[in-house]
Image (cartoon, helix red, strand yellow):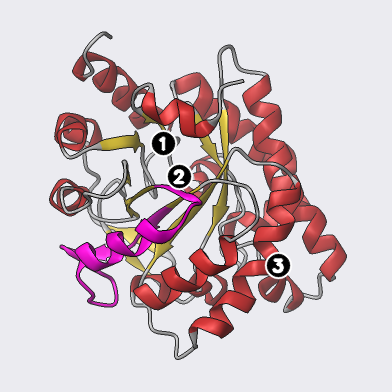
Amino acid sequence: MTTFRDALTAGPLVLDGGMSNELEAQGHDLSGALWSARLLRDDPDAIRAVHRAYFAAGAQVAITAGYQATYDGFARLGISRSETTALLRRSVSLAREAAEATPGKGWVAASVGPYGAMLADGSEYRGDYGLTVAELTRFHRPRLEALAEAAPDVFAVETIPDLREAEAVLIALDGLGIPAWLSYSIRGTTTSAGQPLTEAFALARGSDAVVATGVNCAPAADTAAALALNTALPGVVYPNGGGVWDPETRRWLGAQDEIADLAPSWLAAGAALVGGCCRVGPAEIRQLAERLGASTPGH
C-alpha cells in the first residue's frame, strides 16, 4: 500500500487551491469568525463540491476546510465540544468522499491552522500571541487528536507565523502516527514574526512526523527564494493568488498573480508539493497541473 511518504518520493504532487474563495464564488457568505469552517455544520455538501472541483482540475491533494475549526473558536459560538469533534472529523470525511469519487489516487490533508486563525484578526500574518510553547501545545493537541482519529493521509500544518508556535505543533504531533507538512507564513525570507527561515525550516529536522516544510499564504513572488532556504526536507509551496489581505474588511485587495509560471522555479528549489492558497481557484490549479506536467521529466 502506497503511503503519503512514498508518494512524495515519486514526483511532485499538486495541491488544491483556496477553499474560501471558491465557496464565495458559489455565493456563500463567509464573513463570520469561523469563515469556511462554518459550512462544516451548515452546508457540508458545498465543501464536498469544492473538493471535487479541485480534483477535477488536476489536484492530487485536498486540504480540508478545518483551518479555523478549533474547540476554542466553536465554543465561543456555543458549539459543544462533542459537536466540534464531529465537525473536525467531518472535515476529513468530506475530502475523503471527494477523493474516492475521483478517478486515480487522491490524498487528504487535514488542515491545522495557527492559533491566530482562531482569533480571526489577521494574527497569523504577525505571530507572537504572547503565549508560551506549553500553552500553544495545549491549544493544538486536542484538535490534532480528533483529526487523527479520522485518519487523514497527512496533516497540513499551515500558515504558521513564528518558531514558538512551530515548536508547539511539533510537540503536539508526537505519537499521533500521521505524517505532516509544516508551512510558514512569511515576509520575504523570514517568518511573519521576523525569524530567519533557515532556523524555521531547521526546526523540523528533529521531528519524525514532518515530511515536508515550506511556505504558504504568501506573495507568489517571494516563494521561490524562500523555498530555496529549505535544505533539510522536501519542499511545500502554495502561495496566494495576489493582492493583500485586509483583516478589517476581510477582503483581498489588489490584482491577481499567475502562479503557474512559477512551477519551474519551485521544482528547482526542491518542491515536492505545489498548489495555491487564497484567491487561487480550480482554473489556476488546472494551469498549474498542466505546467507542472510539462516541467517534470518523464511527463
Q: Which residue is mark 3?
A: 142
> Which amino acid type is marked by label 3?
Pro
Q: Contact (CB < 8 A) between labels 3 and 1?
A: no
Question: From the viewer's perspective, is residue 120 above or below residue 61?
Answer: below
> Residue at the location (56% across, 64% down)?
31
How far across and down, in percent of the image, does residue 29 sit? 60, 55
As drawn, is 287 to the left or to the right of 146?
A: left
Task: Identify which residue, 68 or 296, lies in the foreground.
Answer: 296
Q: How many neighbours does mark 1 have within 10 angstroms: few (below 14), some (14-19), or many (20 or more)?
A: many
How far across and down, in percent of the image, does residue 60 sit? 48, 26
For label 3, the SS is: helix
Q: Which residue is mark 1?
A: 281
Q: Which span is picked out in magenta?
A: 182-211
Q: Quadrant location of the C terminus?
A: top left
Q: Quadrant of residue 84?
A: bottom right
> Which amino acid type is marked by label 2?
Gly
